[in-house]
Image: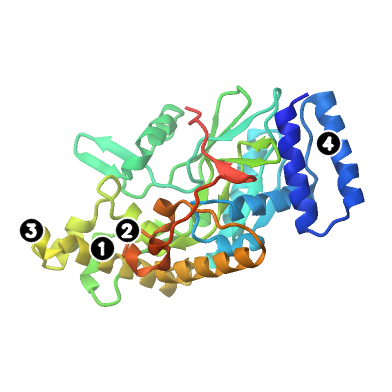
Amino acid sequence: MDKEMLKEAEQFIHTFYRETNKSEIDMQIRLAEITEAIQLQGYYKHTFKELEYGAKLAWRNSNRCIGRLFWESLYVIDKRHLKTEEEMKDALLEHIDYATNKGRIRPVITVFSQETVQNSVRIWNHQLIRYAGYNTKQGIIGDPDSFAFTEECQKLGWKGSEGPFDVLPLVVQVNNNAPKMYDIPDELVLEVPIRHPDISSFEDLHLKWYSVPIISSMRLEIGGIHYPAAPFNGWYMGTEIGARNLADEGRYNTLPRIGSLMGIDIKRNSSLWKDRALLELNIAVLHSFKEDGVSIVDHHTAAQQFKLFEEREKESGRQITGNWAWLIPPMSPATTHIFHKPYKNEIKKPNFFNQPIPY
């Protein structure tokens, strides 16, 4: 019998029954069922209620996430019964549509079948919606962080237009079958053109970003059971786009263009051109999303929300865990309370974990 799985199952079931106020007798009956299942077949299956609560706990325990205040609002879609790539593709498109909600972003997770000796499913995408990256003779086009996956898609027959914002296809794999690729219909991808409330020439940069960050490469682990395909999303914090995706030198590297557009001397560090360009880019991102009615949060509000999360966890008798390097926003971190606090980076389960890239 897998003693480690049983140990983790017992820990999760105790937490689930205690926090949802279920009876001790029912818990003991359920533990007996789980023990028998592990003895007979090497694993057990979660009830929907266990899966639902476990997924929420995984968000609550995510040390890198500043948005954990809303963990109880996560909508869990159970797709564990699906068997084929075509069915998975349809479920992923449903997720994108439901989560996007015409801009009123909803936190969602879609859980596909658990991993067993006989069964394994994977989504090759890091995020369900992401832009391609091309390393061409004319230079870098698009998102450099997508170079490797873009090449894999091209090997599978995908033909991008070599534009800066080409939406990559979905790639799913069932067991050891060849991966299958599916384009995402244009009407499902809500994008926001980035413009500035005061600098009209900002639109000349022709920047945009997609509305929903749906992480699809991580493994969900609940009570010793692994779900290698469990895409999930919240909504963006503005700095994820304005201080990282569009700003990082290893990503879209737009700050030099923005600095030049603003008439700043970008040859001298002492002009603080990067800081000034970064600020205006983040103002533009927040302005554009809000003007288009797409959910987004600024980093100061997100930090205040995290403080409320900390207070509620303390009231519930739970220790606050967190990865400080990830929790501090990438812009003006010292203006938030998070910067000045130590956090214990203890990993609690259920949780989300990185897993090897399947290609």
Q: Amino acid at mark 3?
A: Arg
Element type at mark 4:
helix
C-alpha span from label 2 to label 4: 46 Å
Question: Which color scheme is applied?
Answer: rainbow
Observer-side mark, 1 or 4, equals 4
**What residue is shown with label 3?**
268
How many dots with numbers? Answer: 4
* Residue 24 appears in view: yes
First along the sequence among labels 3 and 4: 4
**What residue is shown with label 2?**
243
Q: Residues within 10 Å of mark 3 (few under 14, many from 20)?
A: few
Q: Position of residue 77 (x, y in %)?
A: 69, 51
**Circle number at residue 181:** none
* Residue 161 appears in view: no
Q: Amino acid at mark 1?
A: Leu
Residue at position x 71%, y 23% in the image: 118
Residue at position x 37%, y 42% in the image: 132
C-alpha span from label 2 to label 3: 20 Å
